[in-house]
Image (tube, grey):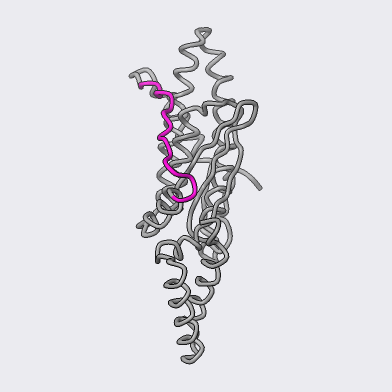
Amino acid sequence: MKNNKKIIDKIYKCLRLSESGNPNEAALALRQATSMMKKYGISDAQVLAAEVTESATQEGTRFNPPFWALALANLVAEAFQCRNLISRQYGRCPEFRFIGMGFKAEVATYSYSVLHRYLFRAIEEFALTAGNSTKDESEKQRRTEVFAQAWLFRVGRTVSEFICENADKKVIDSYIQEKYGETAEMVSETPASNQSADYDDILSGMRAANEVALYRSVSQFMKPPLLQHKHAS
């Protein structure tokens, strides 16, 4: 892909020109694109991959991100028709890389960064409350995970409103295969199992998630969606 990038970019531009309202210009551009594809052995999939973009953000401090960070990344990637890759290096924050068509990768990255901050802050606040009611660190951790699961469940309902059929999956998968090769599925920590006594913690997680609102911009994704705290002025 690296050696052919300039050629593919030229082909892609010609194909865009072939959509021109000027019949002569459109026909000429299409002939040029077809000619270059045959000459250099460029496939349709490679040309489509020219629309694929990447955007990344570094969140958290742990080499192995917690289950809720991975779950949130998958949720956002699905909503915005992207794939999510996670890169980890010792001594650095894990990098969450979103790969999608056009501006979708940037929108997904922005959304994930904001939602990650909201959830991290909510978890910290809940952990303080749980710490006042129990001295058992393992029980405190379990309750915090239950809270995080409830938050994710509630926010998932909001984010799911943005999910539509992902017709770009094959193009993105092909792009990733060509650029990164085989990728491994990251195994996350097993989230805590709920108990009957966790009702209040589940409600707390869902209430905290209700504080987050996600709106489409009036230009329908030409700008990142507006994420805000409902109590913010």
Which residue is at 48% across, 45% downward? 180
Position above or below: 145 against 158: above
- The answer to whether residue 229 is visible is yes
Any magenta on residue 206? no
Q: Provide the residue span drawn in magenta.
A: 178-193
Does the magenta stretch mainly form a helix, a strand or a loop? loop
- The answer to whether residue 159 is visible is no
Front-most of 223 and 189?
A: 189
How many discs appear? 0
Which residue is at 48% across, 92% downward? 24
Q: In which quarter of the image is residue 89?
A: top right
Front-most of 101 and 122?
A: 101
Which residue is at 50% across, 70% downward? 12
Residue, far top: 135
Any magenta on residue 190? yes
Residue 156's spot in the image, x, y percent?
A: 42, 42
Front-most of 30 and 107?
A: 30
Instruction: Indicate left or right for 233 with 204 as reference.
Output: right
Which residue is at 46% across, 12% downward? 139
Residue 98's spot in the image, x, y percent?
A: 51, 47
Residue 101's spot in the image, x, y percent?
A: 48, 59
Residue 124's spot in the image, x, y percent?
A: 58, 25
Instruction: Indicate left or right for 173 with 219 as reference.
Output: left
